[in-house]
Structure formats: C-alpha cells, structure tokens
C-alpha cells in the first residue's frame, strides 16, 4: 500500500460481538468496530464500537470540525462507543450520524436513546449536542459535500445492515460488515458493488469449518471474503470482525492462509492504515 494525501482508512477497532482485552489479543487488538476515513480535508467515520472511544479522544484533541458518522447497523458492538465519544458532547463539533438499514419506520435517534437512558446509562442521548441523527435507505447514493463519493448496498444480517463504498480520484475503499453470504440476490449485488475496489474490509468472523454451526448468525468466513475478492478483482481484501475467541496466533494462521490464496489479502489490526 502507498501513502499520500488522498483516500485513506484507519482501523480503530477490529473485533465483533464484544471487546476482548487480554494477553492473547494484543497484536491485532480487542476493540470493536470503528473506522476513520479521510480524503484531504474530508473526514468520515464508520461505526462507533468500543474503538471509537480512543478515536474520539484523538479527534477531540484537535480543532473542532464537521464530519459524518455512518453506521453499518445498530447492534451493540457497533454503537457502544457513542456514549464515550467526546466530540459528540461538544457543540463546537458538528456530526451528522446516518443509518440506512431499518426495514420499518425506526429512527436512529430512537435506538441510541434506548442505550443512553437510565438504568442502562446515566447520561441521556439528548446530551449528544453535536450530533444530528439522519436516516437513508440502503442502496442509495449519499449526497454530501466533501471529497468522497459514497454509495451503499444492502447486506444480509439480522435486523439489516449496510455496506459502504468510498470513491475518489479512481481509488476505492469498501466496508462490508456485518454480512452473511448465501442469499443469491444479495451476493450478486454485493459482487457488483465491490467490483475493482482497491480495499475491501470484509466480515470474516468464522472459518469455513466453523460456519455450519453459525448459519443464520449474519456473518461470513475469511474463505468467502477471499473468494469474493478474486471474483470481483479486489486488490486488497482485509479480513475483519474477528471472533472474540480468535487469538493473535490464530489470526496469524488465517493471514498466512489468506495470502496464499490472494497475494493482496490482509488481516485487520487496530492502528492499521490503508491508503490505496
């Protein structure tokens, strides 16, 4: 991967389901999903799992600014960092928070209010003074000012989920989590969506051997991620949403096996920066 002032992605959390601190997760990390995407002065975040606490501290240490926060969906491991995200409480910042996975008339604000209310949490969601909550429909293009074009795709996950593609100056980054392969219409649409991407973050929570036990849980395998990348001409498939039971040594083995099938394959680590 090269470096420069163009499109880039930094990973602040790599785990699925629950944070996993401890001696066996030190190298790859134990925080849940959080991404920082930049393109020149444009800033977009995706998901606000536990890794967003550190990201928020980093952003709050800089000058106040406006940015967008897109949620893939609102399961707890993807939203649990929002109550601890410092810029959200600071009116000097301006944050548009988006979700596009609802099949009914739910509102993103309503979901956040459910986790930020007594007796679950002592600080009410109304204290997130920097945040404006917005909905869209999965599959839509997101119209916004800034350096990146953002398109979306419907994923297969309980309760719904949305994948994102960020394009700028011929470079592209896709975020495909949480997703379970196996629905032909969704799979074919997803293949078209990631076609030719430089980077594809992919839900690789399970292995092919483990998957039969977890059919219907809404997650895929690293083997399916590599297969999709080869079919769609993705340069760098990045295995992500690591099972909380998966140790650093086990992820090393997956990284070796994935790279043997696709020379550009990577396994996500906290702090990893990807710049197409």
Image (tube, grey):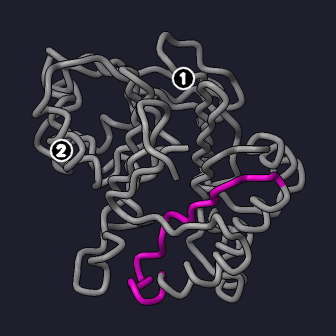
User: Which range of residues does the magenta coloring cover?
Assistant: 232-251
Q: Earlier in the sequence, mark 2 or mark 1?
A: 2
Q: Position of residue 81 (x, y in %)?
A: 27, 48
Residue linked to disc 2: 84
Q: Residues within 10 Å of mark 1 (few under 14, many from 20)?
A: many
Q: Secondary structure at mark 2?
A: helix
Say left or right for 150 vs 131.
right
Please identify the quarter of the rendering in which residue 128 is found: top left
- Which quadrant does the C terminus fall into? top right
Give the camera-side residue of 14 and 16.
Answer: 14
The residue sitting at 34% across, 36% down in the picture is 112
Relative vertical location of residue 194 with respect to residue 183 in this rendering, above or below: above
The residue sitting at 58% across, 26% down in the picture is 105
Give the camera-side residue of 73 and 120.
Answer: 73
Relative vertical location of residue 79 with respect to residue 43 in this rendering, above or below: below
Q: Position of residue 12 (x, y in %)?
A: 33, 53
Q: Position of residue 154 (x, y in %)?
A: 70, 40
Q: Residues within 10 Å of mark 2 (few under 14, many from 20)?
A: some
Say left or right for 137 vs 117.
right
Q: Position of residue 11 (x, y in %)?
A: 39, 52
The residue sitting at 65% across, 77% down in the picture is 258
Residue linked to disc 1: 148
Give the camera-side residue of 231 and 110.
Answer: 231
């Amino acid at each position: 991967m090269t470096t420069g002032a163009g499109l880039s992605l930094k990973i602040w959390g790599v785990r699925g389901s629950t944070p996993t601190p401890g001696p066996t997760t030190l190298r790859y990390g134990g925080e849940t999903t959080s991404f920082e995407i930049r393109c020149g002065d444009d800033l977009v975040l995706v998901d606000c799992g536990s890794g967003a606490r550190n990201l928020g501290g980093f952003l709050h240490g800089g000058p106040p600014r406006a940015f967008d926060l897109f949620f893939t969906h609102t399961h707890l491991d993807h939203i649990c960092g929002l109550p601890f995200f410092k810029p959200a409480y600071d009116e000097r910042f301006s944050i548009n928070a988006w979700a596009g996975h609802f099949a009914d008339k739910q509102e993103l604000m309503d979901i956040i209010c459910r986790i930020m209310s007594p007796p679950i949490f002592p600080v009410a969601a109304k204290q997130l003074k920097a945040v404006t909550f917005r909905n869209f429909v999965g599959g839509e293009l997101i119209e916004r000012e800034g350096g990146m074009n953002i398109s979306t795709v419907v994923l297969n996950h309980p309760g719904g989920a949305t994948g994102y593609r960020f394009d700028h100056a011929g470079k592209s980054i896709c975020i495909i989590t949480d997703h379970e392969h196996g629905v032909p219409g969704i799979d074919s649409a997803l293949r078209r969506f990631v076609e030719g991407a430089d980077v594809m973050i992919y839900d690789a929570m399970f292995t092919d051997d483990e998957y039969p036990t977890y059919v219907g849980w809404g997650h895929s395998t690293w083997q399916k991620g590599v297969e999709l990348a080869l079919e769609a001409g993705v340069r760098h498939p990045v295995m992500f949403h690591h099972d909380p039971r998966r140790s650093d040594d086990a992820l090393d083995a997956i990284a070796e096996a994935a790279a043997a099938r696709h020379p550009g394959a990577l396994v996500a680590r906290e702090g990893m920066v990807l710049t197409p």
